[in-house]
């Protein structure tokens, strides 16, 4: 990330007339209408976020039912990640060009139909295709939801409350997915982990039609085809290569090759964006210090989060012997603490002090919670060993999510709201992919190192090796959160976030 933001941003913003290219905002919906719109948008966000973890709980049962191998299993997760991560920028730009409400509805309906296809899957291939389609429609849905939130709530205090609630949903969705996935898998069928999206989407579609208001789509040029191709190739290469690192190792050709292709393609993408008239990602969006700070912070924190959901789940199941439902319930206290600080920070603190003091503090609190989890032993209990760490981590994550999502779209013109929203999802996806690959690799190495010179058939040695791998992951996740705190403290500007530049005068503060 280029630290010379102020110079680049000022030149970028002052090189054209202040009103150039902006659409006239429509009248804001009534207070009640805005809050009902938030309910609809939060519901859609919950569907996208929980889908990242709900299927993980269902996978072992689905694997037994459809009879596919361990090696093939990763493609059920990777198929979603590849499509979602690589198409987010295009989805964000399409919502700017063709209307956010329209793309929101297309994304909702498409996601629901793809979920129905996955729930009815009669084999691995059909399930992977369905997951890829979920990812593609999710890439249209997620940026549209966040940009609609950004353009609906323009007053600082209301915006803070709205983003606090939205941030709480984003932070808690993964844990809700674990709980819901456990209940559905254990008591109904793994297929309902996908069918449940039909229920959520149906409610959200009706709500969107009745309650969501959109601005007229701004006049625009052609879609940036070269930039789109370069971005898709770059992001697919990066996500695919990082996914292969988990199974093939970091030195394998199928790991290094795609990562190298991805990095080169992303460099080409930046060069294209500097030259084309209508870029897929206008660099003015990312070169603002607050938005750049939010993107960097959420990417690094996203990498650390996988240490919580993935490896703490392993600990609860393998060491403490929890069932899927009990595992999901175990995360509920963390979700409560996320919601507490996200709504508090969002509604009361962010409008007054901005993200700079809140995000570093939240990341350090989360790091403290991860540090607490490094003390877990084979005979630790949930109440004494796991619960305090989860509550501390949740309190920290709430302070990270709400202010960063607010900052990601603050001060951005409405014509760029979709792509600015897409960036926060893109960096979280890439951060999560990097975190999964790195932490899985570190965990495997730690377990292997512990078993050297010991009887690999011993149950106690196996359990202790697993514990060593979890400790390693929790230490690395602690480091990720500390790094996120440092980056946030350096990049964010001091003071409240920028006003909405397109807000009518009566709504600007």
Image (cartoon, grey):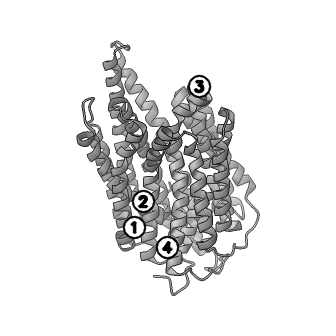
Circle 1 crowding by C-alpha within 10 Å: few under 14, some 14–19, many from 20: many
Label 3 – label 1 distance at C-alpha: 44 Å
Q: Earlier in the sequence, mark 3 or mark 4?
A: 4
The numbered disc on residue 69 is 3
The numbered disc on residue 168 is 2
Whether residue 436 is situated above or below residue 333 in the rendered picture:
above
Q: Earlier in the sequence, mark 4 or mark 2?
A: 4
Quarter that holds the C terminus: bottom left
Whether residue 218 is situated above or below residue 290 in the rendered picture:
below
What residue is shown with label 1? 346
Whether residue 392 is situated above or below residue 213 in the rendered picture:
above
Determine whether the residue tagged by mark 2 lies in a helix, strand or loop.
Answer: helix
Which residue corresponds to the image point at 66% horizontal and 62% vertical from the top-left? 105
Which residue corresponds to the image point at 60% horizontal and 57% vertical from the top-left? 201
Determine whether the residue tagged by mark 4 lies in a helix, strand or loop.
Answer: helix
Which residue corresponds to the image point at 36% horizontal and 16% vertical from the top-left? 452
Q: Are marks 3 and 1 in contact (CB under 8 Å)?
A: no
Any part of residue 81 in sight: yes
Circle 2 crowding by C-alpha within 10 Å: few under 14, some 14–19, many from 20: many
Quadrant of the image occupied by residue 317? top left
Q: Earlier in the sequence, mark 4 or mark 1?
A: 4
What residue is shown with label 4? 35
Of 463 and 112, the residue lying toward us: 112
Quadrant of the image occupied by residue 425? bottom right
Label 2 – label 1 distance at C-alpha: 9 Å
């Amino acid at each position: 990330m280029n630290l010379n933001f102020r110079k680049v941003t000022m030149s970028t913003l002052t090189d054209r007339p202040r009103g150039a290219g902006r659409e006239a905002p429509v009248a804001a919906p009534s207070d009640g209408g805005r809050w009902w719109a938030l309910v609809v948008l939060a519901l859609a966000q919950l569907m996208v976020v929980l889908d990242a973890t709900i299927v993980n709980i269902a996978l072992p049962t689905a694997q037994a039912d459809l009879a596919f191998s361990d090696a093939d299993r990763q493609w059920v997760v990777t198929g979603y990640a590849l499509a979602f991560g690589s198409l987010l920028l295009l989805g964000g730009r399409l919502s700017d060009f063709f209307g956010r409400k329209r793309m929101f509805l297309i994304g909702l309906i498409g996601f629901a139909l793809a979920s129905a296809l996955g729930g009815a899957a009669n084999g691995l291939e059909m399930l992977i295709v369905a997951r890829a389609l979920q990812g593609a429609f999710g890439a249209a849905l997620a940026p549209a939801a966040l940009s609609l939130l950004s353009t609906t709530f323009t007053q600082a205090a209301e915006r803070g409350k709205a983003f606090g609630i939205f941030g709480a949903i984003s932070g808690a969705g993964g844990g809700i997915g674990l709980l819901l996935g456990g209940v559905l898998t254990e008591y109904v069928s793994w297929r309902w982990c996908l069918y449940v999206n039909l229920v959520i989407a149906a409610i959200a579609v009706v709500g969107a039609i009745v309650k969501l208001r959109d601005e007229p789509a701004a006049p625009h040029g052609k879609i940036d085809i070269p930039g789109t191709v370069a971005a898709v190739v770059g992001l697919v290469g990066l996500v695919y290569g990082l996914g292969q690192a988990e199974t093939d190792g970091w030195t394998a050709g199928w790991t290094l090759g795609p990562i190298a292709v991805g990095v080169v393609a992303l460099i080409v993408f930046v060069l294209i964006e500097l030259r084309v008239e209508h870029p897929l990602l206008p660099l003015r969006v990312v070169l603002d210090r607050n938005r750049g700070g939010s993107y960097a912070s959420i990417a690094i924190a996203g990498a650390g989060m996988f240490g919580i959901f993935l490896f703490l789940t392993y600990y609860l199941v393998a060491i403490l012997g929890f069932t899927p439902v009990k595992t999901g319930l175990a995360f509920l206290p963390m979700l409560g603490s996320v919601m507490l600080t996200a709504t508090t920070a969002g509604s009361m603190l962010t409008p007054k002090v901005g993200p700079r003091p809140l995000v570093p503090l939240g990341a350090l609190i989360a790091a403290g919670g991860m540090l607490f989890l490094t003390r877990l032993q084979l005979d630790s209990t949930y109440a004494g060993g796991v619960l305090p760490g989860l509550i501390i981590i949740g309190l920290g994550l709430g302070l990270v999510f709400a202010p960063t999502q607010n900052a990601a779209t603050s001060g951005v013109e409405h014509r760029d709201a979709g792509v600015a929203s897409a960036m926060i999802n893109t960096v979280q996806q890439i951060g999560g992919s990097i975190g999964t690959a790195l932490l899985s690799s570190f965990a495997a190495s730690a377990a292997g190192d512990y078993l050297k010179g010991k009887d690999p058939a011993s149950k106690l040695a196996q359990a202790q090796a697993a514990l060593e791998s979890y400790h390693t992951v929790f230490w690395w996740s602690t480091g990720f959160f500390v790094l996120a705190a440092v980056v946030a403290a350096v990049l964010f500007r001091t003071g409240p976030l920028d006003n909405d530049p397109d807000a009518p005068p009566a709504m600007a503060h």
